[in-house]
Amino acid sequence: MEQTSVFAVPEELEEERFDAVVASLSEGQSRSYLKNLIKDGSVLLNGKTAKPGTRVHENDVITLVLPEKIVPDILPENIPLDILYEDDDVLVVNKPKGMVVHPAPGHYSGTLVNAVMYHCGESLSGINGVMRPGIVHRIDRDTTGSVIICKNDAAHNSIAQQLQEHTIVRRYFAILYDNIAEDEFTVDQPLGRDPRERKRMAVRSDGKRAVTHCKVLKRFGQYTYVECRLETGRTHQIRVHMAYVHHPLLGDEVYAGRRKSPFVTHGQCLHAGILGFIHPRTGEYIETSAPLPEYFEEILSKLDNL
């Protein structure tokens, strides 16, 4: 079924491009997809078609008609899993670099969901629908480490509540650019979608509160090895917060600006090492530890020898 939304252009978007404003006002849709809808006449400006580059004005009316999307079949795939913990309710896996957590346009196979569907069969929570069975949280494609999968809806609701209350322990390990003088520091800055690029996040005064606690583990002069503890869990939180304090992650191709890694990283050096939670059935505290991936250990070794 088609979905129709109507927006009034707010004052802060006055004189912006039509396609940029549509992307800013439409959650969960890529800018390229919306631009094609504009060209197809599925997005109207004051009741008429308009070019993507048309400048809009305050209180202009935008009508967006999203066509019904056909959900592809998501199939189980026999992909090896590095299992850190498993019982009848939850599964904790060590996700490798380059693996997408759940299917999305362009990534309908080879994802963590495809792998856990094969491993768990029908035993996955269904709260997040057919595209994300068992998924209650995620980490970025190029971030390695711990992800918890829920095998039933009761477990899903329990873990989701713990995530909402910020009681799940999540400790990440990262290599940052430059020498950091402080032994410990906290970044408390709200995050939201970057209005100029919807796939990026940014520090925004109107964003959601985000807090990252950091502790220096080792200094290498031009680089610093740190542990980051998440108090909240926003999209790209550590990556954006570290870039905000001018110490972006080594290898981050999105937030490190013009800095280029002299090492082979295939994306940011970020690893979800420690995951702790209250078991949804027993009430017992469970903590898992994912070992650093080989590439990460090799970089630390090279830095030691500089």
Image: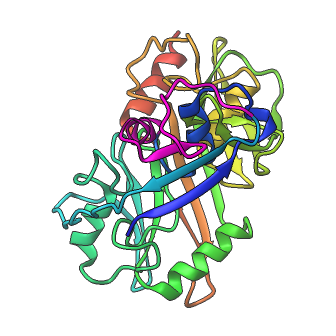
Picture quadrant of residue 144? top left
The answer to whether residue 99 is visible is yes
Viewer-nearest residue: 66 or 115: 66
Q: Nearer the viewer, residue 187 or 175?
A: 187
Q: Is residue 99 magenta?
A: no
Q: Quadrant of the N terminus?
A: bottom left
- In screen coordinates, is 137 left or right of 217? left
When the figure is inspected, residue 285 is found, relative to residue 294, above or below; the finding is below
Q: Nearer the viewer, residue 167 or 103?
A: 103
Report the residue that reaches farthest toward the left: 78
Left or right of 15: which side holds 24?
A: left
Q: In the image, is residue 104 above or below residue 261?
A: below
Quarter of the image where one finds residue 227: top right
295 lies left or right of 274: left
> What percent of the width, then of the height, locates residue 258?
55, 10
- The stretch of residues the image draws in magenta is 31-57
Asked where in the image residue 262 lies, by quadrant, the reply is: top left
